[in-house]
Amino acid sequence: MDLSAINPVQLIAFLMVAATPVLLAAIGELIVEKSGVLNLGVEGMMITGAIAGFAVTVETGSPAVGFVAAAGAGALLSCLFVVLTQFALANQVASGLALTLFGLGLSALLGQSYVGVKPPTTPKVEIAGLSDLPVVGPILFNHDLMVYFGIALVAATWAVLKFTRTGLILRAVGENHDAAHALGYKVVRIRILAILFGGACAGLGGAYISLIRVPQWTEGMTAGVGWIALALVVFASWKPWRALLGAYLFGGVTVVQLNLQAAGVAIPVEYLAMSPYLITIVVLVILSADKSSAPAALGRVFHASR
Amino acid sequence: MSDVLLSLKGLTKAYPGVVANDQVSFDIGVGEVHALLGENGAGKSTLVKMIYGLVKPDSGMMELNGRAFAPAEPRAARADGIAMVFQHFSLFDALNVAENIALGMENPPKMRDLASRIKSVSENYGLPLDPFRTVGDLSAGERQRVEIIRCLLQDPKLLIMDEPTSVLTPQEVEILFQTLRKLKAEGTSILYISHKLEEIRSLCDFATILRLGQNVGACVPRDTSARDMAEMMVGTALKTPERAGRELGPVALSIRGLSVPAPSAFGTALKDVTLTVHKGEILGIGGVAGNGQDELLSVLSGEVLCAPGEVLLHGDAIGQMNPTKRRKLGVLAAPEERLGHAAAPDMSLTENALLTGSVRQGLETRGMIHWSRAKEFAEAVIAGFDVRTPGPGNAARALSGGNLQKFVIGREVLQDPDVLVVNQPTWGVDAAAAAAIRQSLLDLAAKGAAVICISQDLDELMEISDNFAALNEGRLSAPRSTQGLSVDEIGLMMGGAHGMEVAHV
Amino acid sequence: MIRLEKRPDPSRGWSLATPVVAVLATMLAGGLLFAALGKDPIVAIRTIFWEPLFGEFSFYYRPQLVVKGAPLVLIAIGLSLGFKAGIWNIGAEGQYIIGALTGAGVGLAFYPTESVFIFPLMVLAGALGGWAWAMIPAILKTRFGTNEILVSLMLVYVAEQLLASMSLGLLKNPEGFGFPGSRNLQQYDSAHNAELIAGSGLHWGAAAALIAVIFAYVLVNKHMTGFHIRLTGDAPRAARFAGVSPARLVLFCLGISGALAGLAGLFEVSGPAGVVSIDFNVGYGFTAIIVAFLGRLHPVGILLAGALMALTYIGGDIAQSNLGLPSAAIQVFQGMLLFFLLAFDVLTNFRIRLGASEVA
């Protein structure tokens, strides 16, 4: 065992990379839940985004096009959820599960010919001077664009929810859809947009895994990250900055356990590998006492009757 | 009455199986307070929803200031100067006052400017309000102010108020009326929906009466007696429940120093509640909605447990017993919320009869259900309480509110309780059915049961109860005999104006 | 404009017809999918739905139907109880794995002793293992209000890692020449879940599934507990008012579904699979969710749905070897089934009206 091989600077830099997929998916789901919809299909949308982004990148050679395609694929899959929950008024829990099961199958089908293929690398944003700084350089200024995009998305989501009328209406719909309807807001339309946004974010998160984090395509490679993103939203009490914190916590656990595996610690690999899931449970338990900040209409079916 | 502001001509709206409005026509003058009077289900709500653009009429037309008026959505109605205060508040608990108000405006100013406008308008009309308080923490009266101020900020020409006083104490009603009179003096028209006749007589210039969706008459309330208006509204002469002279027996149930924390963020904590109810007594408990009524019922029904000795039945501690055990001992309850609490909406009436009847009616042995007996019990309730339904196999949600209420009350009364706790027993029920329900409570008491009747309808409580107490912010006032109790005294027991004259700023 | 109008009473007709319509729609959409993959859709559908039952080799496939259907039914019956009450155990896959581990572990501990008591002990251990694994989300939910969906699901990944660890470590066959995986329980008579009638596919798991169906039917339709489960699903507040303790119901529903999933795992590992290995689980725990919904959460419906889903597994295998249809296509096919089912379910509670819409 050689713990000295673990470089704390690299650890932090890699933590930000490890956190990005779950962060993107969680921010998307946060918006969905703020509008009063519980979409448990994050895992399915992520894995679909992962294969769509991967395939398009391989075919076009451009990771940028790939990420756009992944966002589109995630949003497209979430349309199924829209049909089920907003038009057919189906149970949101069951519909989310359907989306996940369907997405896992679909991605496996689409990805058959991409197993073992190596995708083009996504370039890092190097800022002359800054990237070469000791410690700060590798941590802050030596990442791919998506890491910064994730953080920017957190800031933008926070600002929109807190300061804009769009954010206010979104919160209102998630709080009391009947009242929002009575005031003349288009509850279903607002929710559809939120769900599509959530799908696009999950797709981006998935593509980040297959294009940058791993990078290759294997069946079921999201391995529960979508579910962890759902847990993260609860952890974050539906607040964007806390989602960032949670994502980094999760990323940290992942990176540390991987490093410990590599360093050959006496703990068996399997027990290290299960640690992110166990820690997610522990965090959920600690934070589930406070549900006061949950959107009041979360998961409830809306049907404008009279 | 000078100029006509809004003119309704032959408005008709039908839903499957029911004509909600049938050729309704009347005019509202500028600066007029116009009452729309009618029983539950008379079509008042549908009518105002058409004016507010929430529902489109099937036929008929409206004119606003002489021009055709057909709002496609509330936004359009608001743009034309129509504002509405809803019966069930359309507010967002987790948002603050200013945010709630901004949501109701087309082009709200910046939050800071809006906040100062809220302050100035609210003080100007005698309805002080802090723009940054979370709405979920406000009292019912304050929540109503939020809605009114939301309307006033848009300088409405017509203000629609749907049953505004049902959530207010008598003192708070007086403050509201002063505001409305001030608005009227400034030339604002008000469409005032209510079934409380005395209020209409003191406030309104003109009244239109709806019955079963039709305009059945109009009157000048000041010159018409409450009894005449009531009979126009109901269509028949009213029968008041008979109340035999009663002698109270020994104490049946008592609560001693009961305190229970609030069940949820926006719920009410019960604080040091003490009461006793005797055999043969009806104890009326009044109070504005949201002052602990639901919580009190839950503690008595056994849904919420407390220290054993805080609730005593015939002197025995039952505070730790669950609802099933309490039913076995004869303590029954009928909650306010019919669908979802007292009854399961998607289940049949037979299943809903089983819901509370399983223990006392012998509908199960060691867990195995006797469906035929359950059905018989459901049929007995349907027959005994004149529940209009094709049969016990129908889902609870298919029943009208009044019929389901009769079923819910009947289900408990027929189980021959020692103690019955009811919350809002006649809410949303037509006058004839309400009278029948009240009579059944009186009969039950006459047979020696103790009845606790929680209600926001003070007239109802005065009519049937022997003693009266009021809930105010989770505290229960000392009970008083209903004989000779004045409206002012009742209002003070309910918390007066809740200190609302004094601003929260 | 199309508009939904709530029915006063749920439609019984549609409630029965929905699964059939959903299956037909899935066949249609599945056919399109297969066509897109370059296969003849009619041949593919025929291969999946006809071949296993009436084809040339149906004598071999029919017993397989029982082998694959039994665990699905067993798990789905347990899940359906919770789903009715709005208690969402999504982690049956994990409970299935743990049941297999504990059950097989008990059996292997006795190796090579032969005794009639070993198999019953394994059954008990399997049920207890699944039950205990389900108690984790149950207790966390009742004590701390933690979301059971997320916890039960996280525990699937934990269980998979445990399975890997066990098949490479504690339960590894000491005579296996270093290969991963346990001893083969099929070759250990006292621990073998053999066919009850040779060549029928009918092993103890299938018997347990049938018993579970009957038990669930009586529970849901004739017993107060079943009534309370349905009541909780329809109106949680009314259930409290009726005297139901939500915490006890959570423990009951999660406990039963965990125990049944554990049993399914044990019967699988000691019978058809034989060996505890990394990839011994094939996702029955997740497919059972589809089975539960497709069967409308009704015990008899689940029995039929389990058979249908087993058919798609077997037919999918045949289509894979005969037509080269990718196995993932069948996964998509199963996912579509749940999708269509939920979509058509709207007709049970709503009527579709054509005409002018209300102002939305």
Image (spheres, coloured by chain):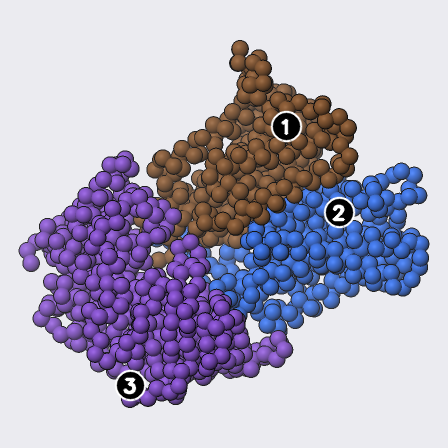
Among the 4 quarters of the image, the one containing residue A283: top right
Q: Secondary structure at mark 1?
A: helix
Q: Colour of chain A?
A: brown
Among the 4 quarters of the image, the one containing residue A74: top right
Which amino acid, mark 2?
Asn
At a point 53% along the width and 76% down the height, the residue shown is B325
Residue B243: give its label.
Answer: 3
Residue A213: give its label.
Answer: 1
Q: Chain of mark 2?
A: C
The blue chain is C
For the N terminus of chain B, the image quarter is bottom left
What distance separates the C-alpha of mark 1 from that of mark 3? Answer: 80 Å
- Name the mark nearer the viewer: 2 or 1: 1
Q: Nearer the viewer, residue C236 or C246?
A: C246
Which amino acid, mark 3?
Arg
Q: Secondary structure at mark 2?
A: loop
Q: Secondary structure at mark 3?
A: loop
At a point 21% along the width and 79% down the height, the residue shown is B484
The purple chain is B
Q: Position of residue A175 (x, y in %)?
A: 40, 48
| Label 2 with label 3: CB-CB less than 8 Å | no
At a point 49% along the width and 76% down the height, the residue shown is B317
| Label 2 with label 1: CB-CB less than 8 Å | no
Residue A23 is left or right of residue B397, and the answer is right
